[in-house]
Amino acid sequence: MALSKEPPYEHGAISQIGVLLVNLGTPDAPTKTALKKYLKEFLSDRRVVEIPRLVWWLILNGIILNLRPKKSAEKYAAIWTNEGSPLRIHTEQQTALLQKRIENSGHKGVMVTHAMRYGSPSISETLSKLRSNGCDRILVLPLYPHYNSSTTASIVDSVFSELQTMRNIPEVRYVKHFHDHPLYIEALADRVQGYWGENGKPDKLVLSYHGVPSFSLKKGTRITASAIKLVDSWQTNLEFRESKSRPPSNRGLEKQNGYALIRLKQCKNSEKIIQDESTSFVRDLYPIASRPSRK
């Protein structure tokens, strides 16, 4: 592997700190061509799909990439804005707000930027940008509250893969998870209570999570444990104790939203208003188009 050329360095320059926010990613446009490129990169990740490579290559290139891009493009088009992808816009806003918050706190020499695990801006080009601006210490913050191999670990893989091409490697740290951090819990509670203030309190609050295959749980994925911990924290903060939240089962999180809604429909009390709150991403995009509404 060839090592890349180092950015210009001025002796005596003060080292900067970089904060890199990394989100899942988004296609460049809600079109079949853009979706095919995005899905190929996403679904080629060995941490996302653990099927034997040869078998998966045939399925991906022979079936999925010929059928799914058009259908996915239609769903993306339904939520696309004049400014572009909602996920990209929101991630850019978060980056700017965090930069301003750090500066207003009196911290100097800190540069906040963002990247996408799949799509653009890529982790590679963003790390190069940080190093070109003199960042010798970098904190990587995956925008996933819960740790999982297919999300956070995939980002870490990509970051350290880029480090292998560098002559002068920066000091790098990463945040593994923050689903149980008090400030995150407080922020989620504030958002839900704000919604209640405008729309009224629902009969049931369903916390939904991104699906993982059952075999992944059997091999050691601990997403269920972190989900249960988050449910407990929410019930305390939101004072929603009269309605016990049901944590995801150990058989997997593949279709738990559907199971939860069926169970609620069969309740004797005839609850009519159900609020669904996603907790797997700081900012989401694609699932919004097909997720049940909050009411």
Image: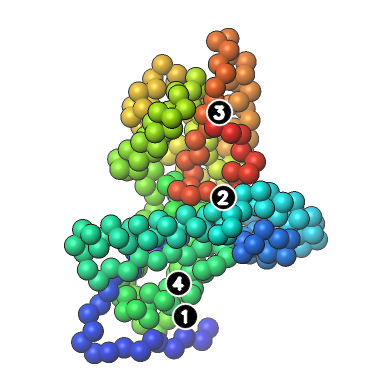
Residue drawn at (55%, 43%) of the image: 210
Q: Secondary structure at mark 2?
A: loop
Mark carried by residue 285: 2
Q: Is residue 63 above or below residue 252?
A: below
Q: Are discs 4 and 3 less than 8 Å apart at CB? A: no
Residue 71 % position (x, y):
75, 51
Residue 230 % position (x, y):
40, 35
Q: Can you identify the residue that label 1 sits on?
A: 165
**Which amino acid is tagged 4?**
Thr
**Residue mark closest to the camera, 4 vs 3:** 3
Residue 23 % position (x, y):
49, 57
Q: Secondary structure at mark 4?
A: helix
**N-terminal of the two: label 4 or label 2?**
4
Between the C-alphas of marks 4 and 1, the distance is 14 Å
Q: Are discs 4 and 2 less than 8 Å apart at CB? A: no
**N-terminal of the two: label 4 or label 1?**
4
Q: Can you identify the residue that label 4 sits on?
A: 126
Residue drawn at (52%, 62%) of the image: 117
